Amino acid sequence: MAQLLHLDASMRWSGSVSRELSAAYAQAWRAAHPDGTYVYRDLAVDPVPHLDEASFTAAATPDEDHTDEQRVGWKISSELIDELIEADTVLLGVPMYNFSIPSTLKAWLDRIITPGTALNRETGEGPLAGKRVVVTASRGGSYAPGTPRESFEFQERYLRAVLSSVGLDQDLTFVNAELTLARTVPALAQFQDLAAESLENAHRTARELAAEAR
Ligand SMILES: Cc1cc2nc3c(=O)[nH]c(=O)nc-3n(C[C@H](O)[C@H](O)[C@H](O)COP(=O)(O)O)c2cc1C
């Protein structure tokens, strides 16, 4: 049975574009997979504790040798890893913050990337490899090729790089909505049409991707 793990990271409740897009994908996925299992995690409401030494060292220590601190830390990490392993499709709603990703998502990544989930570089295999990953990403400006801020784009570039260490880049698609601040920032008002077009394209792509059989 298909399983979708949906994570959101925007701190915003009203007007969040990454949440709007991830919700559209999730809705279309659930319609296409009526018997599927849907798991939702909101990293803004329920933040994952930052990785600490006990949790980090626990990943490379046999369970029976864990200290009390390591047991507590590993419980948090292993639950997140197990939840991810069970999913066939992983959906990430990700806003751009300071040219990169929210720290709440970074905290989740630091816990799910461990020696046990790392990709075997020789075989290309790993417990997370090959899952479908869809990122619905929003950003206030534009980082498209040829734009002045093209080289400041560390949201998609970073996620592609970090997800590749566990093979979550093997079926990875970004659905980007750009210029989301055009509606509210006067200096960007001239880009409102481009912003609307970008959002419309993102919605269409999200719906089409979700409806694909898996
Ligand atoms: C703390 C913070 C930092 C931001 N940094 C950037 C940035 O570096 N570049 C950018 O284009 N937009 C930036 N933005 C704008 C957001 O990317 C934009 O509002 C986006 O739509 C937020 O996602 P959301 O709509 O899902 O909340 C920032 C917004 C916040 C709140």
Image (cartoon, rainbow, N blue to C red):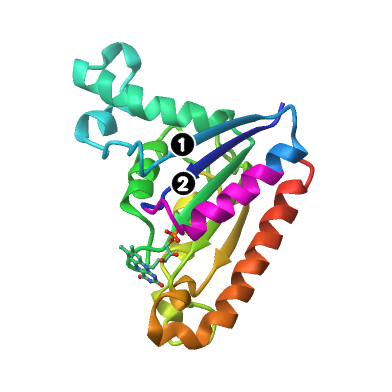
Asked if residue 140 lies left or right of residue 59, the reply is right
Majority secondary structure of magenta residues: helix
Q: Residue 4, image x and y in percent?
A: 61, 36
Residue at left offset 60%, top offset 61% = 175
Which is more N-terminal, label 1 or label 2?
A: 2
Residue furthest to the right in view is: 213
Residue identifier under label 1: 41
Q: Which residues are magenta?
A: 12-28
* Magenta residue check for 13: yes
Of residues 15 and 44, the one drawn nearer to the viewer in this rendering: 15
- Residue type at mark 2? Asp
x and y percentages locating residue 106 in the rendered image: 35, 49
Asked whether disc 2 touches disc 1, contact meaning CB atoms under 8 Å apart, the reply is yes
Vertical side of 209 occupied by 123: above or below: above
Crowding around mark 2 (Cα neighbors within 10 Å: few <14, some 14 to 19, many 20+) is many
Judging depth in this view, the residue of 43 and 186 nearest the camera is 186
The verdict on residue 23 being magenta is yes
The quadrant of the rendered image in which ligand 1 is seen is: bottom left
Image height of 34 relative to 211, above or below: above
Mark 1 Cα-neighbour bin, 10 Å: few <14, some 14–19, many ≥20 = some
Q: Please name the amino acid that badge 1 sits on.
A: Arg
Q: Quadrant of residue 26?
A: top right
Residue 160 showing in the rendered view: no
Q: Which residue is mark 2?
A: 8
Locate residue 149, reporting x and y percent. Answer: 42, 82
